[in-house]
Image: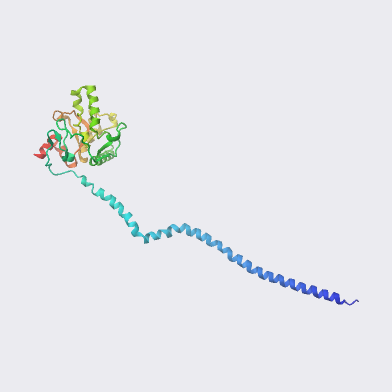
Amino acid sequence: MRKPSLLMVCCALTLTLVGCTTSNQNETEEAENKPAETEQRTEAPAETPKDTEDEVVEDAPTSEAEPPKEDEPAEEPAADEPETEEAPVAEAPPVEEPAQTPSEPLEQNGTANVKLDTLILVNKQIALPAGYKPKDLVTANIDFVDTATGERKMLRQEAARAIEKLMTGAKAANIELKGTSAFRSYDYQVQLFNNYVARDGKAQAMKYSAPPGHSEHQTGLAIDVSSASVGYQLTQSLEQTKEGKWLADNAHTYGFIVRYQRAYEAETGYMFEPWHLRYIGVEHATNVHKTNVPLERYLEQLMD
């Protein structure tokens, strides 16, 4: 048998050494790779906080809702605002009717005394001051017929609030009413009255329409109302409807009187108008309703 040569021995030793080195390198690489895998496993949970953050974002409103508790003083003004807004409502009684007897004369040289405020008297003998127009006109928040536009939907503020309450009360009683005409300026009354005169003659027109300057509508305290039962017309047949009867029985509880009554046509100079409401305040309207007298006589008795 041939003995291995020195060269073969050297080659065998070299291969053995290379194999060991390779094995050690593999082990070293494996050892180095293990931390890498550990790091990857460590990074993987890092995605979990992202989900957690999403949940925190969803809960953020709850977390953000807490600071307002600390900042409550900052919200207190907002809480006070409703009280401030309600204050005027509580002061609404400034709209109270004067209970005392008027100390002012009803008229001076045929001109109405505007100082009487809601008790101002205007009729065929007493006219409003030239150019008179109330300063506190507001649009009444009620249903009007389509032909009522602009200023014809307006009343003095106190009367506007009162007609709103009347309409609310009517609806609660299943009574349907609409406004047809409220404020009328002097110029509008000129046009209206002249049209009536041209159609029916002055004598006839004077029975149902006021000459310019003598209309209660110009005071901002009068409004005509009607119902579907009479086609929203201004007709005496309204008296026979449930709407007309409700007005006759209840208008005074809201501060209005049916101004021109059938029994006093000769005294007022106007035909019976169950649609014409005049605001004078709850107390005075109730007294007029109880005594059943025209406004002229009531005011004269009140001041005697």
Please say whether residue 293 is visible from this viewpoint: no
Left or right of 300 on screen, residue 81: right
Quadrant housing the N terminus:
bottom right
Residue pictured at 74% horizontal, 73% vertical: 21
Can residue 283 be seen by looking at this rendering? yes
Furthest residue in direction left, as rendered: 304
Pick the quarter of the image with the C terminus.
top left
| The one of 295 and 192 positioned closer to us in this rendering | 192
Task: Pinpoint residue 158: horizontal percent, then vertical percent.
Answer: 23, 42
How many discs appear? 0
Q: Which of the 4 image quadrants contains residue 22? A: bottom right
In the image, residue 207 above or below residue 49 = above
The residue lying furthest to the right in this view is: 1
Q: Is residue 30 above or below residue 247?
A: below
- Residue 192, percent from left and from top: 24, 28
Residue 116's quadrant in the figure?
top left
Whole-percent x, y for residue 107 in the image: 13, 36
Colour scheme employed for the rendering of this structure: rainbow
Residue 53 location (% of width, % of height): 50, 60
